[in-house]
Amino acid sequence: MTAPRPVIFEAHGVSKNFAGLVAVNNLSVRLHEGAVLGLIGPNGSGKTTFFNVVNGVYKTSGGRVVHRGADITDWPSHRIAGHGITRTFQNSRVLLNASSLENVMVGGHLHARAGLAGVLFSTPGARSREAKVKARALEHLAFVGLTDYADELARNMPYGAIKRLEIARALQTEPDILMLDEPAAGLNPRESENLMKLVSELHRAGKTIFIIEHNMRVVMGLCQRIVVIDAGAKIAEGEPDQIRRDPRVREAYLGKGA
Ligand SMILES: Nc1ncnc2c1ncn2[C@@H]1O[C@H](COP(=O)(O)OP(=O)(O)O)[C@@H](O)[C@H]1O
Ligand SMILES: [Mg+2]
């Protein structure tokens, strides 16, 4: 028996309302260090909104978020990222007119601390920091399998490569928790298979992963635990096999009588 890893992230009764609409309803989620947790639910059930709230994109309407002992509720995104939680977006945030390498370097600006003056006047300190940032970005590009694209403009890259680039960008902030919002969306079966492998490698490299994914094969294959939400509220939580058999989950996905 291995001892359970510590809980490093906890959302307690998190809610988010938009002018009368309850998008996230009293949702509690715990992440154990090194785990891969899945978040699933029908379209519009509040998955992305939950990510947005715990990442400081939106202010909470209620509840608390705790990461490694710090109450990070309603912290600004950059501060949350600096504390070790980074996420990718369902809709790409990649800069199309920048190279992959530049995209990854920008993704890590939190840790780069380049300082505008340093960049403008190119002090020796700034140059050596820049070199470190670049070296780290190249490592992250290699990790996601994009070394050959380092100098390619993002606009010339295939969609599957862009999805990987987003992950390399997120890695540049050296997160301990990586939150992925539908990383396999729009990928063909072979690309999504490769993306699953990449997420498994991240897991093996010690990252804690919280993933929203529509593709059930991806979710069931990757996650040790799955949280299911419907209309913003948790309707089930458990191991993939439990979730597959859960009548409430089937009902939420397939409608009553399924
Ligand atoms: N900024 C917003 N303003 C108003 N309503 C929003 C906003 N963002 C999301 N919603 C609504 O919240 C609900 C949950 O959306 P979302 O979190 O995107 O669902 P999911 O990611 O599960 O598909 C939807 O009804 C959506 O229209
Ligand atoms: Mg979404």
Image (cartoon, grey):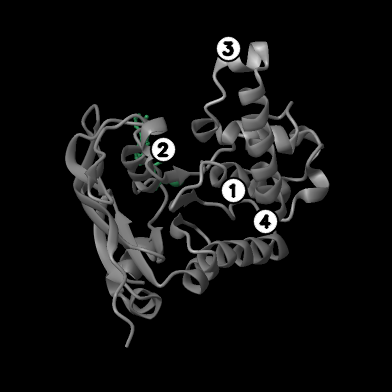
Determine which residue is flagged by label 3. Answer: 117
Please tell me which residue lies in front, 180 or 169: 169
Task: Return the x and y of residue 86 as percentages of the image width and height.
Answer: 45, 44
The answer to the question of whether label 2 and label 3 lie on touching residues, with beta carbons closer than 8 A, is: no
In terms of secondary structure, where does tag 1 sit? helix
Disc ID at residue 82: 2
Quadrant of the image for the N terminus?
bottom left
In terms of secondary structure, where does tag 2 sit? helix
Q: Is residue 26 above or below residue 79?
A: below
Quadrant of the image for the C terminus?
bottom left
Determine which residue is flagged by label 4. Answer: 143
Residue type at the position of mark 2:
Gly
Mark 3 nearby-residue class (10 Å; few <14, some 14–19, many ≥20)? few
In terms of secondary structure, where does tag 3 sit? helix
State left or right for residue 13 relative to residue 243.
left
Q: Residue at x 39, y 55 (%)?
A: 42
Q: Is residue 258 above or below residue 253?
A: below
Q: Quadrant of residue 187?
A: bottom right
Comes first in the chain, label 4 or label 3: 3
- Compute the Cα span from label 2 to label 4: 21 Å
Comes first in the chain, label 1 or label 4: 4
Q: Is residue 18 above or below residue 26?
A: above
In terms of secondary structure, where does tag 4 sit? helix
Determine which residue is flagged by label 1. Answer: 167
